[in-house]
Image (cartoon, helix red, strand yellow):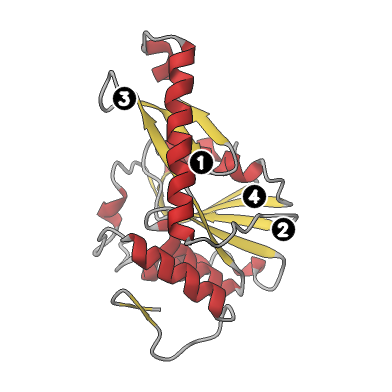
Amino acid sequence: MRFRDRADAGRRLATLLLNYGGHDTRVFGMNGGGVRVAYEVAQALGAPLELWVSRLVEVPVQPGSRLGAVAEGEGFFLNAETVRSVDVPASQMTQWMDAEAGEVALEAQRLRGGHPRMEPGASTAVLVVEGIAVEDLRVYAALRGLRRRSPRKLVLAAPVAAGEELERLRLEADEVLCRHPVWALLTVEHAYDDFHGLPDIEVRQLLDRARERRPGREVPGAEVAGEWL
């Protein structure tokens, strides 16, 4: 299965989540293309949409080596294998993680444009990502950040994902849903015909549009950065 673009992926993914429509559900799109996918899910469910930022933390002294990831909500995930292999003090690793946490806060502020963050509260929180490749540590950190905000239920939803990661992620979420699981997925873009980078302005427009319109209601002529909503 291939998806035409993120909007197509979101509409197909939404069919797996219809049981959550009409309930106290809040949809969180992970930064990057996840917001575009999540927009379609939120509209189909009649649920509010929010951004959830997560970033990788690399080891400066070993380019390409992933120490872990940090996310909003004080979500932290460490790659145990990397921690064992890097010959630096734990305090140095903490500094690297803290520095990236600061970048997470700045990115979230920039993309929300001054709007306060919507919290999961006592709702069902659905984290939507554009796909899950092998060892995508950002997803783990994002789930942990949302979990710390005490949602009633935490759901992870992805259009496409590596099967081995889905099994591991079942330990982090109450439910994991995937439209197209595959045995191995090294790069998410291979599942899309159109996988252009999502500019900040498009993310902000999607979030603004979701705030302004009643979820599920069609707005003729609504357009975001060249893509029909």
Q: Which residue is mark 1?
A: 71
Residue depicted at 30% across the width and 62% down the height: 2
Q: Measuring from the top left, give residue 35's x and y in whole percent.
A: 44, 61
Residue identified by numbered label 3: 65
Q: Earlier in the sequence, mark 4 or mark 3?
A: 3
Contact (Cβ within 8 Å) of mark 1 with mark 3 = no
Type of the residue with mark 1: Ala
Which residue occupies 61% across, 75% down?
46
Residue 148 badge: none
For marks 4 and 2 on the same chain, the one whose residue lies earlier in the sequence: 2
Crowdedness near tag 3: few (<14), some (14–19) or many (≥20) residues, C-alpha within 10 Å: some
Report whether 146 appears left or right of 159.
right
Regarding residue 164, the answer to whether it shows in the image is: no
Is the residue 149 above or below the residue 21 in the image? Answer: above
Q: How many marks?
A: 4
Disc 4 to disc 1, how far (Cα)? 16 Å
Find the residue positioned furthest to the front: 114
Q: Which residue is mark 4?
A: 154
Badge 4 vs badge 1, beta-carbon distance below 8 Å: no
Disc 3 marks which amino acid? Answer: Ser
Q: Quadrant of the C terminus?
A: bottom left
Q: Quadrant of residue 191?
A: bottom left
Nearer the viewer's eye, disc 4 or disc 2?
2
Q: Earlier in the sequence, mark 4 or mark 1?
A: 1
Task: Estimate the x, y position of residue 128 in percent, counting from the top left.
Answer: 50, 56
- Mark whose residue sits in front, 4 or 1: 1
